[in-house]
Amino acid sequence: MASARRQTRNDSRLDSPKGLRTNFPLFQSSDRFGRFTEAIARGMGTPWFLFGLTVFVIVWMIYNTVAPEQWRFDSAAIGFTALTLILSLQASYAAPLILLAQNRQDDRDRVQIEQDRQRAERNLNDTEYLAREVVALRLAVKDLASKDFIRAELRSLLEELDRDKAESKAD
């Protein structure tokens, strides 16, 4: 009953292609599968992987050359066919996994670029706003009276008061 309900719920989902729907837990979340492919691609790109693969191939070849005939499982006479198949299988899985990991990185880069663009746009708007405010402050300060102007006005008022005082004494 629960699996039938789950199946109908998956069939009614419109956000994923019909061919990609699965009940396998690893593939249910594309993010989980993406992290899995990135981990494999990251592991394949390490020197330890190359070293381990080299050791594996050397041990395989030595064993299938030196071991008694009845214990060998791959023949050097026919060019280590099983080893070639194993390495081909590994390569055929490695390439798509690496491409999937690159696609996920491209998606992350695209999101990061968009966020950087938005941040730069906000910074530009903030800078323009601050520049307008600085200009407004400069204009406001330019209209303010300076100390020298105020002193000159006070002196002229004092002189005028002194004259008025002198004229009123003269009368």
Image (spheres, helix red, strand yellow):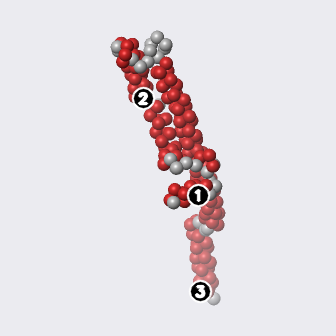
Cα gap from disc 1 to disc 2, whole angstroms: 43 Å
Disc marking residue 169: 3
Disc marking residue 72: none
**What residue appears at the point 52 percent right and 49 percent down from the top-left corner?**
23
Q: Residues within 10 Å of mark 2 (few under 14, many from 20)?
A: few
| Residue farthest along the top direction in this orientation | 77
In the image, taking residue 165 as reference, residue 38 lies left or right, namely left
Q: Amino acid at mark 3?
A: Lys
Q: Nearer the viewer, residue 171 or 133?
A: 133
**What residue appears at the point 59 percent right and 66 percent down from the top-left corner?**
146
Q: Earlier in the sequence, mark 1 or mark 2?
A: 1
In the image, taking residue 171 as reference, residue 87 lies left or right, namely left
> Could you say where residue 161 lies in the image, as x and y percent from the top left?
60, 80
**Residue 124 visible in the displayed image:** no
Quadrant of the rendering where the C terminus is positioned: bottom right
Cα gap from disc 3 to disc 1, whole angstroms: 111 Å
Residue position for label 1: 8
Disc marking residue 49: 2
**What residue appears at the point 48 percent right and 14 percent down from the top-left corner?**
79
**What residue appears at the point 56 percent right and 55 percent down from the top-left corner?**
7
Q: Amino acid at mark 1?
A: Thr
> Could you say where residue 119 lies in the image, as x and y percent from the top left?
58, 52
Q: Earlier in the sequence, mark 2 or mark 3?
A: 2
Q: Amino acid at mark 2?
A: Phe
The reply to whether the C-beta atoms of the residues labelled 1 and 2 are less than 8 Å apart is no
